[in-house]
Amino acid sequence: MGNVMSAIAKKVFFLQVVFFVTVGSVSEAQENALGYPALAKTTIFDTFEVEKVKVVPVVSGLSNPFGMAFRKNGDILITERYTGKIKLVRNGELLLGDVGVLAGLYTDAFRAGLMAIAIHPDDDSIIYLTHTKAIEYQGEQTQTVALSRGKLVADSLTKVEEIFVAEGLDTAIAGSVLLFGPDKKLFMSVGGAYAYASTADYAQDSEVHYGKLLRLNEDGSAPKDNPFIDNEEFLPEVFTIGHRNQLGLAFHPETGALWASENGPQGGDEVNIILPGKNYGWPLVSFSRQYRGDWVSEMSHKEGFEAPTIIWWPSIAPAGIAFYSGHHFPEWQGNLFVGSLIEGRIPGTGHLERIVFNRRGEELRRESLFAELKHRVRDVQQGADGYLYFLTDEEDGALLRIEPVL
């Protein structure tokens, strides 16, 4: 055990000292502000490869936004976790009223509510939403994760139907994100396999959806080419197992590989390259500690389990992820951007992290961006205009855009 922990400590120290670059400055007025800076004005930051960039507020006044999706006409749809509302941003303005409010949304537990949003690749009036759902389990009221589908008609959500409900009992409020693949199959993460004995083992349990990445047809059914479709011990929707809580999905623009971010408890946050049918180890192998301080596992790696491509120590609570392929920042092309909710369990340390790779896809360095804003970064995506957009998950959350300083 001691040798294993020593090896982990050396690896983590190497990651921190060699790879992590923190650069950033903010305007004097904002630097001298007390508390959380307001996100009402454009702020200029110094960065590493790009000398200066500006963070431009698109809209504010969002209530704990969770996910966003871009329509072909430039509209941006944003989900609010606890209100259950879907907001519409058009031409840089937040429209009055709501596109819709998800009926019957369960919000009576910590982290429960409306989560991810995705748009059908062939018809951007059809949207998909993940959310918590109240259920009865062994005579008690509790919750699980569900997937609903609806249609936008004249800026209103109609014909909402529940098309998939996760099997298992959610005792930790699972996170869930969505992403359509090039083959028009829908990937859906179901977290909830936290560091408690009652839930951590879900990730290795073939009879529940928790701690898994799922792959679904557009109607919520299981595709016939899923890796476990012929294995009666597994639920047919399962694509990969051994996850704790995945909060970000993105396809690499050159290789086409699917990447996923994953939260550890204390340390051991990960980004993984997803391969069908593979086991990513949680909680049998991990770089993380329990919240009470002991190691989750005596092993950080083992044959038969996929090793993470990136790890963090201390935790940054990685959320949404996006590869940059736009033209506004040539120096950033191919870089991975990761939203951070909090670093080392210290409030006000959320930021956007940029990770640089070499030609072999190996990590070279990291840069912490916009930490001075002191906001939780929930989602990050590249818009059709080639700019990066990110959401801050606060009671007064905002949608922001990164632009070059010309």
Image (cartoon, rainbow, N blue to C red):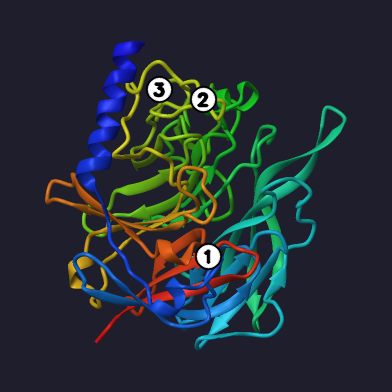
Mark 1 or mark 3, earlier in chain:
3
User: x, y (%) of residue 353?
Assistant: 35, 56
Tell me the residue that label 1 is attached to: 392
Q: CA distance from mark 1 to mark 2?
A: 29 Å
Residue 211 x/y as whole percent: 53, 34
Task: Please rate how many residues cluster around mark 2, counting C-alpha atoms within 10 Å: few if below 14, some from 14 to 19, many from 20.
Answer: few
Q: Which of labels 2 and 3 is toward the front? A: 2
For the residues carrying marks 1 and 2, which lies nearer the camera in this image? 2
Q: Tell me if 236 is positioned left or right of 163 in this view.
A: left
The numbered dot on residue 285 is 3
Q: Relative to 136, does residue 48 appear above or below in the rendering?
A: below
Disc 2 residue type? Gly
Nearer to us: label 1 or label 3: 1
Q: CA distance from mark 1 to mark 3?
A: 32 Å
Q: Amino acid at mark 3?
A: Val
Quadrant hosting residue 5: top left
